[in-house]
Amino acid sequence: MEEVSKTVLEMQQRIASKLRAVGAYSKDKAVTAQEADFDTPEQNWLDYIAGGLFALVKKTQDKRYYITTFCNFQYIQRQNT
């Protein structure tokens, strides 16, 4: 079970990192999987990782992705410590 959790967290971080790199910080700036340059494993995990109520990666109705403000705040806090 621990390995599954580790895999999910690692994939979530890979996806969030790519979204950060293209500036997808809000619904207005959301990007497609192709624009974020997600590889096949990342695309396969998108539906699982994105879109939940407390998910850090969110999905729009037209299947574009972005990271939440909360996620951005945590990332900025880590960079400053």
Image (cartoon, rainbow, N blue to C red):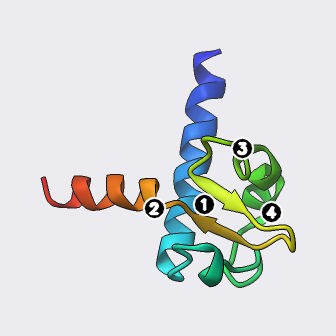
The quarter of the image holding the N terminus is top right
Circle 2: element type: helix
Disc nearer the start of the sequence (2/1): 1
Q: Which residue is mark 4?
A: 40
Q: Which mark is residue 45?
A: none
Q: Position of residue 50 (x, y in %)?
A: 71, 52
Mark toward the viewer: 4 or 3: 3
Disc nearer the start of the sequence (1/3): 1
Whether label 4 touches label 3, CB < 8 Å: no
Residue type at mark 3 is: Gly
Circle 4: element type: helix
Q: CA distance from mark 4 to mark 3?
A: 21 Å
Q: CA distance from mark 1 to mark 3?
A: 15 Å
Q: Which residue is mark 1?
A: 15
Q: CA distance from mark 4 to mark 1?
A: 12 Å
Q: Which residue is painted at 45% across and 55% down in the image?
A: 71
Q: Which residue is painted at 70% across and 69% down in the image?
A: 65
